[in-house]
Amino acid sequence: MTQRIDKALIAEENAKLESYLKEDYQALGNQLARKNINIDDITAKAEEFQIAVPSWGTGTGGTRFARFPGEGEPRNIWEKLEDSAVINDLSQCTERVSPHFPWDKVDDFSELKQTSDSVNLKWDSINSNTFQDQPGQEHSYKYGSLANTSVAARDLAIQHNLDCIEWGKELGSKTLTVWVGDGSNHPGQQHFQSAFERYLESMKTIYAGLPSDWELHIEHKMFEPAFYSTIIQDWGSNILAAMELGPQAKSLVDLGHHAPNVNIEMIVSRLIQFKKLGGFHFNDSKYGDDDLDSGSLHPYQQFLIFNELVDAEYRGQEGFKPNYMLDQSHNVTAPIESLMNSAASVQRSYISALLVNRPQLTEYQTNNDALMCSNTLKNAFNTDISPILAMARFRKGGAIDPIATYRKANYRGIVGKLRPSSGGNGSGIV
Ligand code: LRH
Ligand code: MN
C-alpha cells in the first residue's frame, strides 16, 4: 500500500496558518492592485505551473568520493514514485516524474503506468544512459557511446535509446533526453569533426525512431566525465546538432553544465529565437556541475532566465513550450524537502517574472535608460510573492508550509521502518 501524507493532517496544519496567509495575501493584493495587477490572475498562473522531478533525485545523492544514504531510501522506481507522490501532495506543482533507464527499468511497464496513475503522477522526459556499462555488457562505453569509434558500441547505444522510446510510449511520455559523456581527456585523443560526425549519424538513427508527436532533447555539458573535450560541450554544438537533426530535435539547458558566470539567460534567448529551446534541468552551482538546489545560490540568475521565458510567452513566440524539470543531487539534505523547496523556488522565479512591467521595460530599453531597465526587473524580483505560492498550494489542496507539514507527518520515519536500508554507501550520484 502506497504511503501518502494524510489529507486530514495537511488540513490540520493549514488551519494553523490560514488566517495569516489570507492577511498577507490581501496585503500583497492591495500592493499589486496599485500596479494594475490582479493577484488572483497571478495565483491562477502559479496553480497552472508544473515542474517535473527526477526519479534519481528522490534518493540521497553523492559524489565520486562517497554517498551517505539516509533512512528509508527509495530502493526502486516503485518507492521513488511513492516519494514523488508525497512531493506533489504537498507542493501541488510536481505531477510529472522523469525516469532514467536502466536505473528505473521494470519488466512490466503497464504495471508501472497503472501505479503512477493510481498516485496521480504522469511521466515526463525519458533519460537514456549510455554513460555507464551494464553488467556483462559486450561493447563498453569506456571510449564513448554514440560517438565511439567502435560501430558495435554505437549500435548498442542507438538501440538503448530506441528501447527508451518504446518504454516511454508505454508510460505516456513524449520526450527522450539524450545526454552522453562522450569526449576525451587528452589533446589529440579524439578527432573532433569525425567524432561529431559519428555522434550525428547515431542521433539521426535515434531521431528516425521518434514518434511524430515526440521531441528529442539534446543536453550539453562543458565537462565530466570527460575532462579535455566533450562531444556536446556547449549550446553551440547543441543547437548545431538540433538543427542538423530536424524540427523535433531541441536543446535542453542544464544550468550546472556551463562555466561559472556564463550568461545562461542570453543562451535561453537565442534558443527561443531559433525555436530550439526544448527545456531545462534546473539546479544551482558555484564551481562545476554541483547539482545543488535550484535558486539556492543564484536566485536572480534563475529569475532572469524566467524573464526571457515570460517575455517569449508575452510576445507569443511561435512554437514556445519549454519543458521544466529539476535535476539535482541531494547529498546533505532530505531529498523530498530539497525537491519541494526547489520546485517552489523555480515557481517563484516564474511568478516574479510575470510581475515585470514589460511595456515600461521596452520603453526604457528603447530610450537606453539602463538604470530604469535594471530597476524594472529588480522591482519584480524584490516583490515578496510568497503569499501567492502558498495560496496556490492551499487552493489546490496542498500544504501552505510543505516542509513543516512533511516533518509533522514523520513520513521518513514511517517508510524507514518499511524499507530496510539498502546498505552500501559506496559513491556516485545515485
Ligand atoms: C549529467 C546529467 C544528465 C543526467 C545525469 C543524471 O550531468 O545532468 O541530465 O542524465 O545528470
Ligand atoms: Mn541534467
Image (cartoon, rainbow, N blue to C red):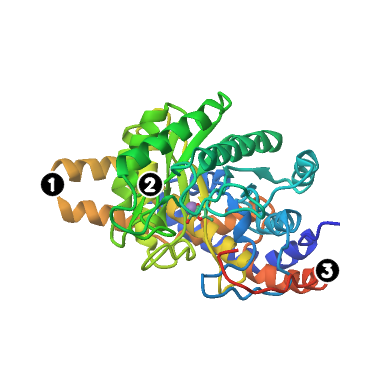
343, 211: nearer the viewer: 211
Q: Which residue of the protein is positioned furthest toward the top in this rendering?
A: 212
Describe the element under mark 2 as helix, strand or loop.
Answer: loop
The kind of residue on which mark 2 rests is Ile
426, 188: nearer the viewer: 188
**Label 1 neighbourhood size at 10 Å, few (<14), some (14-19), many (20+)?**
few
* Residue 331 position in % (x across, y down): 55, 71
Q: CA distance from mark 2 to mark 3?
A: 43 Å
Q: Is residue 332 above or below residue 119?
A: below
The kind of residue on which mark 1 rests is Asn
The kind of residue on which mark 3 rests is Leu
Q: What residue did someone put label 1 on?
A: 368
Q: What residue did someone put label 2 on?
A: 231
Residue drawn at the location 69% of the way across and 53% of the way down: 397
Q: CA distance from mark 2 to mark 1?
A: 40 Å
Q: What residue did someone put label 3 on?
A: 418
Instruction: Answer yes or no: disc 2 within 8 Å of ligand 1.
Output: no
Q: CA distance from mark 3 to mark 1?
A: 62 Å
* Residue 282 position in % (x across, y down): 47, 54
